Image (cartoon, rainbow, N blue to C red):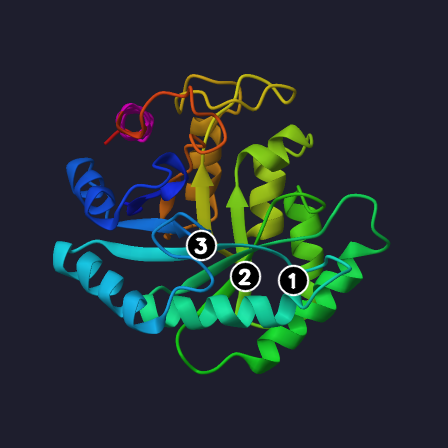
């Protein structure tokens, strides 16, 4: 049975104590922490504070499955490699195994080549600290096929895939096709639902058109044993139901 988690995207600005209490209340073994200003952790959070946060979660028996960066590794400006490596340091301090990254920006030339080059650079610089980097199905790499193409070029076990189940679906890729493409690389899965590809406002899991039960069946087929994490986008949709209501629906659709 896959362990459960949820993203702090559903509790924008909430302190660590509130997040761990919510995780315990709804039977989640871990959380994803957004790494952004105004959240529990940010890119400039001092190491001593990171260690204190880690102790808070550890004392409650709640893991931190991923540090969710907002770095687009293929973007044409800045130093995405340095940004990713900073997030790896943050994840290490928190005891988290994964750093989430995004792809690129719309309209740029050959984002797949840029992402492959940058992630290969990251892989070559990663310390032996138990933290790996996951490229999410997102932005210019919506589908499993697109993400798998980048990861095949990177060719490192330290760089894997995160399947956000809405994005391949809205791009027209079937759950079976996504599972087959990402299978060799898949480390983490974000579950959410939506009414239609044109309306991505949060819908309680199992109540939308994404076909969450079908996704779960495909994950079983490929033998995925990692976390299933609810990504409830209340930070972007403040009128969405409280995260507790979404977590209750999440557990129902999973048959828990």
Q: Main secondary structure of the magenta part?
A: helix
Residue 211 appears at what percent x and percent y?
50, 24
The residue under label 1 is 151
Please provide percent x and percent y for residue 251.
27, 30
Whether tag 1 and tag 2 are in contact, CB under 8 A, the answer is: yes
Disc 2 secondary structure class? strand
| Residue 47 x, y percent position in the rendering | 34, 72
In the rendered structure, find residue 160 and report the number of the disc placed on it: 2
Image coordinates of residue 212 in percent, x first then y, are 45, 28
Which is in the foreground here, disc 3 or disc 2? 3
Q: Residues within 10 Å of mark 2 (few under 14, many from 20)?
A: many
Is 154 rendered above or below residue 60? Answer: below
Q: Give the residues in magenta.
A: 245-254
Mark 1 Cα within 10 Å, few/some/many (few <14, many 20+)? many
Alpha carbon distance from label 1 to label 2: 7 Å
Residue tagged 3: 35
At horizontal 56% and vertical 67% (from top left) the residue drawn is 84
Q: Compared with residue 159, is residue 7 higher up or lower down, i.e. above or below? A: above
Residue 184 appears in the picture as rendered: no
Name the residue nearer the viewer: 226 or 205: 205
């Amino acid at each position: 049975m896959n362990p459960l988690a949820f993203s702090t995207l559903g509790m924008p600005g909430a302190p660590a104590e509130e997040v761990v209490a919510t995780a315990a209340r709804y039977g989640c073994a871990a959380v994803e922490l957004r790494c952004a200003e105004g959240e529990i952790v940010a890119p400039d959070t001092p190491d001593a504070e990171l260690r204190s946060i880690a102790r808070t979660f550890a004392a409650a028996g709640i893991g931190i499955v991923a540090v969710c960066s907002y770095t687009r590794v293929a973007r044409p400006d800045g130093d995405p490699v340095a940004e990713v490596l900073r997030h790896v340091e943050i994840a290490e301090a928190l005891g988290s195994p994964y750093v989430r990254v995004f792809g690129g920006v719309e309209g740029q030339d050959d984002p797949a080549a840029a992402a492959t080059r940058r992630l290969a650079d990251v892989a070559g610089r990663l310390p032996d600290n138990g933290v790996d980097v996951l490229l999410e199905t997102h932005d210019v790499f919506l589908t499993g096929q697109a993400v798998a193409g980048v990861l095949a070029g990177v060719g490192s076990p330290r760089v894997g895939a995160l399947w956000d189940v809405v994005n391949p679906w809205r791009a027209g890729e079937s759950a079976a096709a996504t599972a087959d493409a990402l299978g060799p690389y898949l480390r983490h899965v974000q579950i959410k639902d939506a009414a239609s590809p044109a309306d991505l406002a949060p819908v309680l899991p199992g109540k939308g058109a994404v076909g969450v039960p079908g996704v779960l069946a495909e994950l079983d087929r490929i033998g995925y044993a990692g976390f299933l994490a609810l990504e409830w986008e209340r930070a972007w949709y403040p009128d969405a139901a409280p995260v507790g209501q979404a977590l209750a629906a999440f557990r129902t659709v999973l048959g828990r």
